[in-house]
């Protein structure tokens, strides 16, 4: 599959240029100034260290280069850097045109010029130094900072380079308006570094463990740099209103799928050989790209199986604008939003936009599941501006914000990828739990934290402006205990409580008091995920497969009231004879006696040395 998709991504390089060019005509920045978006330049930084030979055997990085080159609008600027132990700039920043695209494609062989070491700091520093406005760096890497041997201790030099990158270089770049998007090619990459680079500069971070992940990641980055209006594609149907001047449908499907059929509002069926006047249709193994100018008003539909990443963008003088949509959301923090409509042709807004439009915002998982939803309120009765607050996310991972505006005859959407992170992260080290503020507005002056272990408060102290240290007592490695962290924050003259998950200390202990885990890694999934409430809810089912007979008996004791209640409920539906009730009482008595015996025996086993194999619980 990787070979097939690698080839597909390569094919996408020139055909999606049509889609990019179409989108360019409707690019709008979030403040309504198209020039700001079109002035952006995109600088792709490719890791060519030796490990890429193993982690990218099908050369998807080369196909990714071609894909992004095709997606860049002709009015933008772009450049290419490669790095291993040294940094090269084979394609300096310049305006994107046909000549630029051809040069970019010719550089694909340079991406297999592998080098032994990995100097991420030098690569980002050099790529960001070239002059330009609205710079976006797109970093693709599979490893960690690994400098070539030199003077002094190598491990210390690697650590210092990482620290300088995160604490000095990236913050200074963020102040200059440089955004870093980072895609990790493997779990062996420094995921915390990848995420921090993006978080500090309001960029996107993704873990691409499959070609599908890589394709989605690049499309998400493209839509964040060059946001465009879309119309919803639902059940293979999409609406086209009188304001639409043209639409471009990018339809993903399986390689062996039959060609889709485009059906117009009048019922006429179109194929690659039978198109509307002036339309184009690019057919490739995994996608079709259809561009239709001056489309007929009404509902269009697609006959054929489509992937959920398919989309339809539109060119229209009616533009949707939004307040700033951050690339990172934080657990426990709401997102205020403003959405308004303007016309780029100078005409006044129609009455159905001013009065009949309804706007909602949703937070969706990558697979389209709903995580949060809120309707926005019109600012004034005859105004095309809407305002509201999206509730604080309760999940973490990669997600999408979907802003949906629908009127009597008009339907528009704006889709933006986001990363959702905890407001405060935690890690355990050397008898302490170290807490760090991830939200940029949290620090030790406005955030008060407390720690409780089994009802007893633990000492907690601030170590710098954004970090705290919890001192732990002596703990047995055999017992996993929940550490409760509570927080209160003062922001903007308002107080709020931070809902932080319980952290399980000694998660590998034989006896687990709670199933929550202490996990310092922030980037653990490509999609939003919940922490299971107990091991029995784990998708892997490891706990149920490995628990001992005593564990099963104790679990049966805990479940006894619910089971007995269900049994009583069933009996209530039957004739109420004294014999039935007596039998039930006898069964319950036997279960209780056996459970008490099993629990006492289990307690003796815990207090005595034994050679029983430790139970491994699934990691949250």
Image (tube, grey):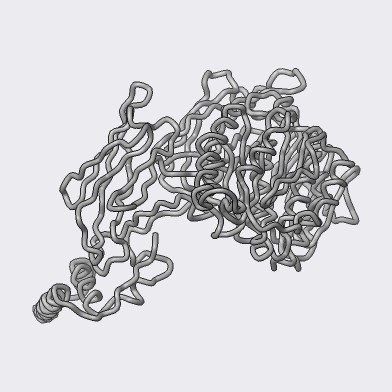
Q: Where is residue 87 in the image (x, y as percent from the top left)?
A: 71, 46
Residue 500 placement, left or right of 553:
right
Q: Residue at x 73, y 45 (%)?
A: 81
- Establish if 50 lies above or below 344: below
Q: Residue at x 57, y 23 (%)?
A: 385
Q: Residue at x 69, y 42 (%)?
A: 222
Q: In which quarter of the image is the C terminus?
A: bottom left
**Residue 194 visible in image:** yes
Q: Where is residue 228 in the image (x, y as percent from the top left)?
A: 69, 36
Q: Which residue is drawn at 60% across and 60% down?
A: 209
Residue placed most toward the observer, 302 or 493? 493
Residue 291 placement, left or right of 490:
right
Q: In which quarter of the image is the N terminus?
A: bottom right
Q: Position of residue 165 (x, y in %)?
A: 55, 40
- Establish if 149 lies above or below 604: above
**Residue 267 visible in image:** no
Residue placed most toward the observer, 312 or 209? 209
> Which of the 4 image quarters holds residue 74?
top right
> Which of the 4 image quarters holds residue 479?
bottom left
Residue 175 placement, left or right of 573:
right
- The total of numbered circles placed on residues is 0
Residue placed most toward the observer, 419 or 615? 615
Residue 413 placement, left or right of 509:
right
Q: Where is residue 536 in the image (x, y as percent from the top left)?
A: 34, 67
- Establish if 175 lies above or below 181: above
Residue placed most toward the observer, 485 or 228? 485
């Amino acid at each position: 599959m990787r070979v097939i998709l690698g080839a597909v991504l390569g094919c996408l390089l020139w055909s999606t240029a049509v889609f990019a060019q179409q989108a360019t005509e409707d690019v709008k920045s979030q403040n309504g100034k198209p020039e700001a978006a079109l002035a952006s330049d995109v600088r792709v930084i490719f890791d060519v260290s030796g490990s890429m030979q193993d982690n990218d055997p099908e050369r998807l990085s080369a196909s990714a280069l071609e894909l992004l080159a095709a997606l860049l609008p002709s009015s933008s600027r772009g450049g290419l850097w490669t790095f291993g132990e040294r940094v090269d700039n084979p394609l300096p920043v310049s305006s994107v045109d046909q000549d630029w695209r051809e040069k970019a494609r010719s550089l694909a062989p340079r991406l297999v010029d592998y080098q032994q070491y990995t100097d991420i700091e030098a690569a980002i520093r050099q790529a960001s130094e070239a002059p330009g406005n609205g710079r976006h760096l797109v970093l693709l890497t599979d490893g960690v900072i690994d400098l070539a041997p030199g003077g002094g201790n190598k491990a210390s030099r690697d650590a210092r380079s990482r620290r300088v990158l995160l604490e000095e270089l990236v913050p200074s770049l963020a102040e200059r308006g440089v955004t870093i998007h980072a895609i990790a090619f493997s779990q062996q990459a420094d995921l915390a570094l990848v995420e921090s680079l993006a978080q500090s500069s309001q960029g996107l971070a993704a873990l691409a463990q499959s070609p599908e992940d890589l394709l989605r990641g690049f499309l998400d980055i493209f839509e964040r740099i060059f946001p465009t209006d879309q119309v919803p594609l639902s059940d293979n149907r999409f609406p086209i209103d009188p304001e639409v001047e043209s639409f471009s449908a990018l339809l993903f499907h399986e390689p062996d799928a039959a060609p889709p059929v485009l059906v117009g509002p009048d019922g006429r069926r179109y194929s690659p050989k039978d198109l509307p006047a002036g339309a184009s249709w690019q057919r490739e193994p995994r996608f079709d790209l259809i561009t239709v100018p001056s489309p007929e008003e009404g509902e269009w539909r697609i006959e054929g199986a489509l992937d959920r990443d398919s989309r339809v963008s539109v060119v229209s003088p009616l533009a949707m604008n939004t307040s700033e949509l951050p690339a990172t959301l934080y657990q426990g923090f709401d997102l205020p939003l403003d959405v308004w409509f303007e016309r780029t042709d100078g005409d006044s807004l129609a009455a159905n936009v001013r009065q009949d439009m309804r706007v909602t915002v949703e937070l969706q998982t990558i697979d389209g599941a709903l995580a949060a939803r809120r309707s926005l309120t019109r600012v004034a009765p005859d105004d095309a501006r809407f305002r509201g607050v999206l509730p604080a996310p309760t999940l973490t991972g990669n997600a999408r914000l979907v802003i949906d505006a629908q009127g009597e005859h008009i339907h528009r959407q704006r889709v933006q990828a986001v990363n959702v992170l905890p407001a405060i992260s935690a890690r355990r080290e050397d008898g302490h739990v170290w807490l760090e503020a991830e939200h940029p507005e949290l620090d030790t002056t406005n955030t008060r934290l407390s720690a409780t272990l089994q009802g007893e408060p633990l000492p907690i102290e601030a170590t710098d402006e954004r970090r705290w240290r919890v001192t732990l007592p002596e703990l047995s490695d055999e017992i996993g205990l929940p550490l409760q962290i509570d927080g209160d924050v003062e922001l903007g003259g308002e107080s709020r409580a931070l809902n932080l998950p319980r952290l399980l200390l000694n998660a590998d202990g034989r006896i687990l008091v709670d199933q929550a885990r202490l996990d310092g890694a922030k980037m653990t999934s490509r999609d939003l995920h919940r922490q299971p409430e107990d091991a029995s809810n784990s998708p892997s089912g490891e706990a149920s497969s490995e628990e001992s007979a005593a564990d099963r008996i104790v679990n049966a004791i805990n479940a006894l009231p619910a089971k007995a209640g269900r049994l009583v409920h069933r009996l209530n539906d039957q004739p109420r004879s004294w014999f039935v009730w007596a039998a039930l009482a006898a069964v319950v008595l036997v279960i209780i006696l056996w459970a008490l015996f099993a629990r006492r025996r289990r307690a003796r086993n815990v207090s005595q040395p034994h050679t029983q194999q430790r139970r491994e619980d699934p990691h949250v």
